[in-house]
Amino acid sequence: MTTEISDRTSNESHYRQIYHRLGTTPEQLAQFCQRWQIVELSLFGSILRDDFNMNSDVDLLVTFKPNHSWGLEFIQMREQLSTLFNRPVDLMTRQSIINSPNILRRENILDSAEVIYVQKLEFILSQES
């Protein structure tokens, strides 16, 4: 039990540090994701490492709700994230990385990506009359 509490405290501290680096709150990020029909948002790259600095960009993987995709709005989405984080953003869909022919890059990104937002799933149970 002590290990679980220690792990949870360490995990909370890690995420506080991530959001501090991003310059935003979980609530602001959740609002953004809900507006854009995002079911999962992950970080990868220097934001997760000790070499992150004031000149670093933020690398993100995004997964949209099924049957939701964006054309030129994807650029607007990236710009809104850049404004939210006050730094450049590199935004890619998870599927584009999965489909990448560059095996080393694909494995590196997918193995290191850390989820920071997951849409809550709400289940409605119907009762039979």
Image: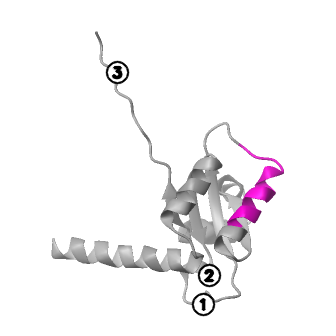
Marks 3 and 2, how far apart at CA: 46 Å
Picture quarter containing residue 109? bottom right
Nearest to N terminus: mark 1 or mark 2: 2
Q: Which mark is residue 126?
A: 3
Nearest to N terminus: mark 1 or mark 3: 1
The reply to whether the C-beta atoms of the residues labelled 1 and 2 are less than 8 Å apart is yes
Q: Position of residue 92 (x, y in %)?
A: 71, 61
Kindly identify which residue carries mark 2: 46
Q: Residue at x 62, y 81 (%)?
A: 46
Predominant SS along the magenta part: helix
Q: Position of residue 95 (x, y in %)?
A: 67, 52
Residue nearer the viewer, 85 or 6: 85
Secondary structure of the residue carrying tag 3 is loop
* Quarter of the image that includes the C terminus: top left
In this view, 107 is above or below 36? below
Kindly identify which residue carries mark 1: 51
Q: Confirm whether the magenta stretch covers residue 120.
A: no
* Quarter of the image that includes the N terminus: bottom left
